[in-house]
Image (cartoon, rainbow, N blue to C red):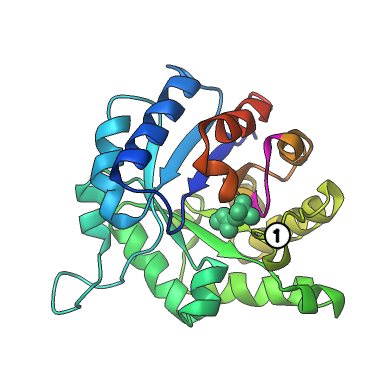
Amino acid sequence: MSRRILIAGNWKMNMRAESGASLAKGIVDAVGKSPAVEVVLCPPSVYLSGVADAVVGTPVELGAQNLYAAEDGAFTGEVNASMLTDVGCRFVILGHSERRQLMGETDACVAKKLHAALAGNLVPIVCVGETLEQREADDTESVIETQIRGSLEGLDEARAANIVIAYEPVWAIGTGKTASKEQAEAVHAFIRELLGKMFSTEVAEQIRIQYGGSVKPGNAEELLSQPNIDGALVGGASLKVDDFAGIINAAPSA
Ligand code: 13P
């Protein structure tokens, strides 16, 4: 079963209207008309429309960095799934470790958002990952299992194939320290086996599992050529056309 490589740029809280539009145009040019991989840009929510204008009619897709799990109503400052699809999003990042750590998001909260995303026809990119302390205590697998079971709570097999998991070890995010290809592949294989137990082997084989954490043009090829690594969720290196294009071009074609 071949899973199409998915390269997503998480701009986090960076860029401005003009710089974001020009970054998006640069990526569109670099990607061309029929890329071998799927490419998604996830700008801050206030810039989604501007980036949507830059990528419309091209293979480059749009994603948001978060959503609020409710229908329209009195939720000051929040944005829901229907608003995200309205401005052209197909994807949404959920449960990023920065949101888990800084905004107190729990697995239960991520699960609510997951259901809201799927109900709104968005593809959720569910982030999981262990801290350095947890890795050193040999707790990586139990931490990941708890996060995945909790964040996917209530998800049925029929919908499970539509989600994306991003394994982002917290200690590798923005630190320049990447998990080695062996370390990353071991966790990805563990996640796929877990998804097989939770759903079915067939569904687990369809779910894309991205790696994230200091992915750069120089390490992308070895990471993306691992059998269970189906893409990358890129932070810092997604803010420069050359770096992000370098990662896209390093992906083995499907
Ligand atoms: P960096 O690529 O900057 O390490 O960030 C990874 C990340 O958090 C993507 O979501």
Q: Going 40% across and 49% down the picture, which residue do you hit?
A: 15
Is residue 216 rendered magenta in the image?
Answer: yes
Residue 14 seen in this snapshot: yes
**Residue toward you, 234 or 148:** 234
Q: Is residue 240 above or below residue 101?
A: above
Please state the horizontal and vertical placement of residue 106, each as a whole percent of the image. 50, 81
- Highlighted magenta segment, given as a residue range: 211-217
Please state the horizontal and vertical placement of residue 187, each as a whole percent of the image. 77, 59
Q: Amino acid at mark 1?
A: Thr
Where on the picture, by quarter, is residue 197?
bottom right
Q: Is mark 1 within 8 Å of ligand 1?
A: yes
Please state the horizontal and vertical placement of residue 190, each as a whole percent of the image. 76, 60
Q: Going 67% across and 58% down the picture, which residue do you hit?
A: 196
Q: Going 60% across and 69% down the picture, which residue do you hit?
A: 148
Q: Quadrant of the N terminus?
A: top right
Q: Secondary structure at mark 1?
A: loop
Residue at which label 1 appears: 175
